[in-house]
Structures are given as C-alpha cells and as structure tokens.
Amino acid sequence: MNADDGDSYKIVVLGDSGAGKTSVIFRYAKGSFDPSYGTTIGTSFVTKKLDYNSSLKIWDTAGQERYRSIVPMYCHDAAAIIIVFDVTSSNPVESVERWMNYVKDSVDAETPIFVVGNKADLVESDDELSKFTNGKFLDRQVYVVSTKTGKNVELLFDEIANHLIGSNKRRFDQKVPQNSNSHIVQANQCC
C-alpha cells in the first residue's frame, strides 16, 4: 500500500478451530456466509477498504494446536487482536483465556483485544447469551455475533475501525502542537 492510500491497520483473528474465525472475516469483508468454509491451514488475509481513506488487513489464522507456535509471529505488529469463541462450546472461558495467554507477550500493552462470541444464532434465547454480555465474562466487553445472520458483525468492525483511527489521530495530535507557529523561510536568491 502506498502513502496515498491512507492508513492500513493489521488485525489478527485468533480462536479455536471451528469457532468461526473465517466466517466472521468473510461476513464482514464480503457480506456473505458460507457454511462450507473449511479449516484454515496456516494463515491468510483479506483487505477491507474503509470510507475514510484507511483499510483493515484482517489476518485469518489456523486454530489447530499444531499452528499455535506461529501465533506470536503474526501478532507482534498487529494494530488489534480479535479472539473468537463459539458461544455453544462447553468451556468458552478456558478458550479465551488460553488465547489471551498466547498473545500477551506478543503485543504491546496498548494493543486492543476484542473478544467475540460467534454462533449466536444457535442459542435459543437471549438469556443464554447474557452471560457473555453482562460484563462478567472475563471482565471484558464481549461482542456476540452471528455470521450466519450477520448480527453485530458490522458493528464489531465499525467499533474496531473507530478505535484504531481514533487512537491514531490522538497519537498524531500529541505529536503536532495545536498552537505551533509555522515560519516559512525563503532561501536567498542569487543573481
């Protein structure tokens, strides 16, 4: 991406195999759901252009145990991390905590980590989902989504983009004094 294309933000999506990481990415980037997505081998990425001269490079990672050793390599320069878990799994807390431990030494303390519960369409009542959204799930905000219906997927990525672009603007504003006096110095002309 060249300088005229704006800012590009790397987002790494992690989670157990079968949690729906690829489905989350493709629902957002392509606006579609395909129940036949296969298991991701290694990594891949999709670029999504944003309205405000920026883009998200969303990295899809394999969730199988044998690929976990490469997770730090992909996370170390990420602008944000998304950890996806299956809301119907027997122990989502263990899954999210395990992934948090994998990334904690690979990212800066300021790197935001978004926790996403996928497959909300498979849960019969909102009461069952409230255990993830009432603020008590690992003391984090959890975005409960359904890639099948599209529920909250756009909201998730809008919030990520707004956070990243807002953080970038704050860093830029801190570097450039608001009341700086600019002086134009003209070179002496000769002859």
Image (cartoon, rainbow, N blue to C red):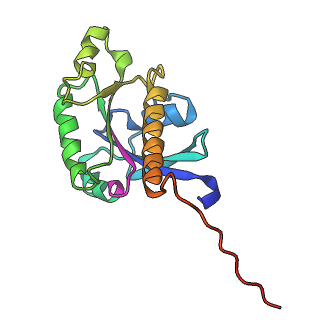
Residue 16 appears in which quarter of the rendering? top left
Whether residue 158 is visible to the viewer of this picture, yes or no, is: yes
Q: Which residue is depicted at the point 56% across and 46% down?
A: 54
Q: Is residue 43 above or below residue 98?
A: below
**Which quadrant is home to the N terminus?**
bottom right
Asked whether 76 falls inside the magenta stretch, the response is yes
Residue 33 image offset from top left, x and y in percent: 50, 28
Residue 177 image offset from top left, x and y in percent: 48, 55
Asked whether 84 falls inside the magenta stretch, the response is no
Whether residue 118 is visible to the viewer of this picture, yes or no, is: no
Q: Return the residue nearer the eye: 155 or 174.
A: 174
**Which quadrant is home to the C terminus?**
bottom right
**Boundaries of the magenta span:** 74-83
Q: Return the residue nearer the eye: 54 or 28.
A: 54
Q: Is residue 108 above or below residue 48?
A: below
24 relative to 190 in the view: left or right: left
